[in-house]
Structure formats: C-alpha cells, structure tokens
Amino acid sequence: MTIEKKISKKTIETETGVSRRGFVKGAAVVTGAAIGSGAITGFPTIWAQNIKDVTLRQFGTGVSNINAVADKVKEDLGFTLQMTALDSDAVAQRAVTQPNSFDIADIEYWICKKVFPAGTMQPMDTTKLKNYQYISKLFIDGKLTPDSEIAQGTAPHTVGFVEGADSVEFASAPTQWMTLIPTIYNADTLGIRPDLIDREITSWADLLDPAFKGKASILNIPSIGIMDAAMVCEAMGEVTYGDKGNMTQEEIDKTIAVMIDAKKAGQFRAFWKSFDESVNLMASGEVVIQSMWSPAVAAVRSKGIACKYQPLKEGYRAWGGGIGLAKHLSGLELEAAYEYIDWYLSGWVGAYLNRQGYYSAAPETAKKFMSEDEWGFWMEGKAAEGDILSPEGKVMEKAGAVRDGGSYEERMGSVACWNSVMDENKHMVRKWNEFIAA
C-alpha cells in the first residue's frame, strides 16, 4: 500500500468531512474504484489495505511499554501494537543503530537529546493532534505555573521542539514540530523501609549515612544515577555545582570521588537497573534506603510490606518521556501512528498511568477516566475515601491513605533537577563506570 502524497489532518477533514480516525478505519474498505466512482472525493490515490493488517512496532523502557495499552489499541483503533521493553541504555543504542527495527520509540527526554540529532526519527506535526492543547505546560515552556523556576538538567521543553519538518536541531522556543509527543513523567526521590529505619529521613544525604552501611542502593543508569549522586553530594555539602544538569569535568570528578569512597566503605548493597530489581531489593529487606520509582514503592506495598516514597527537603529529581516516530514511517502506517498518539493523549492511558503513580502529560483528559476519589488521592493530595486500586484492580492503598509528597503541584513544584545529558557526557559515563567497577 502506498500513498502518493502526504495526507494531513486538514486535507482529510476539510476536503472530505472525514476525521483521521474515520480515514484510518475506512481504509479497510476504500478502493480505487470507490474513490473513482465519486462516492468519496478529495483523497489521493490509495491502494486498499485492511487496517487490521497494520502493525506498528514500539520499543522503550518497561515503565510505559504496557501490554494493557497494546490490548486497548487493538480494541479502540483496530490495528496491532507490538511492544518491546529494554533498559535505558539499550533503548538509546537501538534508536540510533537500528532505525529500521522500530516504528515508534517510547523514550525519555534525556535519551531524545542523545538520539534525535542522529536523524533516525522524524519531527511530528502538532497540528495533526486535536489533543495537543491538553498537554501540560511543563512540556511546552518548562514551567508548572507562570512563576515557576525551570529546574536544572535536560528539561523536556529544551529538547521537545525542532525548527521544521526536516530539522534535527532543537528549537529554543515552541514550534509546530515536536521531537516527542509527551506522555509520562514523575518526580522521583528515595524509597525507604520505615519499619526497618528508626529515625526520620529528611535529606538526600541520608543515602550515604553510615547507619545504613550495606543496606543502601542507587540505580545504575548513568544519566539518571549521576543526578541522584549530585543531589546527595550537594545535600552533604561535599560539592557545590554551578549547574547539576551540566556539570564541569571537575564537578563530575568530585561527585564520583564521593560515591567511590562510599562504595569502598561498604555503603551499597547493590546497584539496580530494572524496576523489578528495585522492588526485590526493598521487599526482601536487603536494602532499606535507595533510589526508587513511585510505582516500585507501590509494588512493595502491594505485597503487604511497609515502604515509603520519602519527600526530601532538597526537592525531587524529575524525568519525562514521550512517543517519537521512526524516520521511515509513511503512508497508512504513519496515519495510524498519529491516530495512536492522539488516542494516547485522550485520557484512557493517562488515567492508567496516574493509577500507577506516574503523571499523565495530558492531565485534563485523564481526569475524565478517573473517579473523584482516585483523582483526589493521586493528584490533589487528599486522603482516600475508599481503597485505591491499581490498574489491575489490586489494592494499592487503604482508605485514609495520603499520597507520599502530597499533591501534583507540591511534588512537581518541588523539582530540583531533571535527568540529564551533559556537555561532558562521555567523561561522565566513563567516571560513572569507574564508580560501579571500583
């Protein structure tokens, strides 16, 4: 199946009165003869193809490559979404070195900074997305509110736009063309086992408290781990940074030296890369304090084990991700991909992500798919009136519980930095690996 010229939302809707969703589903029955008969006008020449035969290959981290989403796509849109989950380093490598192996890249913004300039992905036309208007301003200009300060690191808006349809240069202000359509984000902190810790945890510096010798852990993904390490070193007063998100070589060296000293002193029980590893370390009690992701804390709690996502006085480390399209994607598959992305922003997936403890990039649409009690708990910092359930229907929090860190505004408003790719990235990765191998 080929399409002789690019089909825009404007062309489809204004010339035919048919929405993109109608076009994509209708492609299953439209033939050249039908178009030629005058029954439908305004389309370029289309060879018949059943939408049920369309398969889009998506890869990314396990955070958001969720089988339930693929099942819902099949139910709502009619085509197949194949998902492959990899770790962050493998995601970055595949996006650059195997561009024909995927159609959709579900990646984080720090990864986008590394891979988009390689030219293996195509800018996306925001005018094709009716739900673009609902995307959080954090992804447009970096500010939660007009008075917010932009956090250090690779904030999503700094790598979110390019100048044109064929550009690989990041734009300094919002344009019509996005690198990724944002989908998911969160404010991360330290997870703790309050039943195994006999004092209050208030600072990132507590990760290296000798009281937790042999029972601490940090995640081993350099561009993320280095930011946790920087939060720790700054809180300890060991390193003063000009910009934690873009350290000098000297700042990197000082940070890694602190971490190596701690490792040699026996502070760390392990280093983890995957969600499951972090859950197992905490649930087993081998670790009582560590870098952690919000749903991993919830997963430990679902086992009936005490676990808390501890707000800290220095603030949170944030991250965000989105969906990007492979350069080669075209024709009906490209239209299906745009339909999928717009559907992703329409609310069902956003509510699913919110129920896991993440945040939807389009919170207004997600709210429509959540109960008032769910929204109050996850987004407004209110005590749950009833049990809070996971997307799979398991009890995550009992009635009366309040989300760790409070409301969306409190948590995202306390972000100190974003996961980051620095100018000295190669030096940073080399030094980080020295720390892990020390």
Image (cartoon, rainbow, N blue to C red):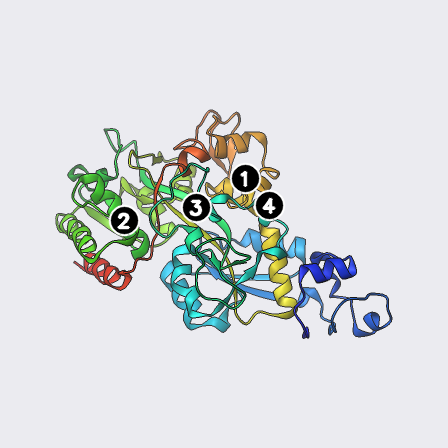
**Residue appearing at x 62%, y 52% in the figure:** 343
Mark 4 / mark 3, whichever is N-terminal: 3
At label 3, the amino acid type is Gly
Residue 407 appears at what percent x and percent y? Answer: 45, 32
Mark 3 / mark 1, whichever is N-terminal: 3
CA–CA distance between discs 3 and 2? 16 Å
Q: Residue 348: give its label.
A: 4
- Element at label 3: loop
**Against 372, is 219 above or below?**
below
Which residue is denoted by mark 1 in the rendering?
393
Q: Is residue 115 left or right of residue 74?
A: left
Which residue is denoted by mark 2 in the rendering?
243
Circles 3 and 1: CB distance less than 8 Å? no
- Element at label 1: loop
At label 4, the amino acid type is Trp
Quadrant position of the N terminus in the picture: bottom right
- Element at label 4: helix
At label 1, the amino acid type is Gly
Q: Quadrant of residue 237?
A: top left
At label 2, the amino acid type is Asp
Mark 1 / mark 4, whichever is N-terminal: 4
